[in-house]
Image (tube, grey):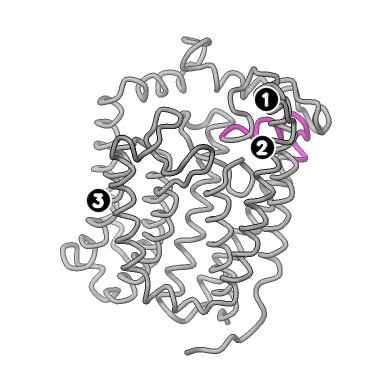
Amino acid sequence: MAKSRSVPDVWMIAATLGILAIGVVMVYSASAVAAFHDYGDSYYYVKRQLIFAALGIVSMFVMMNVEYTFWRKWALPALLVCFGLLVVVLIPGLGVVRGGARSWLGIGSFGIQPSEFMKLAMVFFIAKLLSERQSQLTHFSKGLLPPLGILGAAFALIMLQPDLGTGTVMIGACLLAIYVAGAKLSHLAGLGMLGVAGLVGLIAAAPYRLQRITAFLDPWQDPQGAGYQSIQSLYAIGPGGLVGLGLGMSRQKYNYLPEPQTDFIFSILAEELGFIGGSLLIMLFLLLIWRGMRTAITLTDPFGSFLATGIVGIFAVQVLINIGVVIGLLPVTGVTLPLVSYGGSSLTLLLTALGILLNLSRYSR
């Protein structure tokens, strides 16, 4: 068992706590109006966010002191449990439908999203598999096909819910780890073309996805339907200007922008805090991603390096998709902004993942 070489990365801790603080403030600002209207309590959402943030911070500091090699031993059991949960959530009467997707397990207002747990469990397993088969990775059938087959099976179960956003984040993070491990670009390019063809098929199979694509190309074709969220998001960002309208002064949160505390919270932030506030948040994300990749690069243990890459990939892909959707560069999909958007299981799990990344930073050179 290796001993810790240093303290955890303080820049990573600072960036994490900074993003989390901004998130709590913005959850309150974005949700206060809707919370008072729906529950008679302006603090309804932020109180729950604070509870899960506190649980997440405790989990982060615990994981920061648990040696990362622990996850090599438990990677397969964690993956099997998550596969089981993905099957259970599809059973009517057990899986809870929210937002049109059967993605939740729970009772009443308490629930967990198994696909969120699968993202992290898959990163554990892919890192373990890559570290054991790295020398075979340039061989398609022996090295590349096994991790891709397992990844594809998990993606298929997630798509049955359906939850394209979470599945895309998982695929993106794991492919980043596979690329870093030494997979051939020609193999990945060929798979990329197959993936595009599959994505076209998924879009064609579900009319609502096709509507999102057409709304992305021209939201004004259906301003009261498929294009509504994109238009209202831009209406929020535009008036924000350089310094914003002021904290708490958003207009779009008054039932114009649906669920402003979740997927489109960055729109409210840009409206209230402007270009400067939005840029500050993006810089904190870049700092977090940079320090995470620095940890991955400087680790000598392949498993640790691939695990760090996968965790950073989850954050990087999720931030890229969320902000891309909000500013109109990507079609609308259900991906939250890490550590900022309202959501209990996602927030706690992401802070737990950061705790593991901080433990990895203790072993970097």
Residue farthest toward the left in the current orientation of the protein: 141
Residue shown at 41% from the left, 19% from the top: 214
Q: Which label is found at residue 45?
A: 2
Separation of residues labelled 1 and 2 (CA atoms): 9 Å
Q: Quadrant of residue 365?
A: bottom right
**Residue at 32%, 48% in the rendered image:** 86
Q: Which element is circle 2 on?
A: helix
Span of residues in magenta: 263-277
Query: Which one is in front, 109 or 256?
Result: 109
Instruction: From the image, tell me which residue sits under label 1.
Output: 34
Query: Which callout, 3 or 1, points at the residue further toward the start of the chain?
Result: 1
- Residue 115, percent across and down? 40, 48
In the displayed structure, does residue 30 sit left or right of residue 128? right
What residue is shown with label 3? 153
Instruction: Estimate how packed mark 3 is, as few (under 14), some (14 to 19) or many (20 or more) residues with alpha carbons within 10 Å.
Output: few
Q: Position of residue 326 (x, y in %)?
A: 58, 31
**Magenta residue check for 272:** yes
Q: Nearer the viewer, residue 341 or 268?
A: 341
Counting other residues with Cα less than 10 Å from the Cα at mark 1, is it few (<14), some (14-19), or many (20 or more)?
many
Q: Amino acid at mark 1?
A: Ala
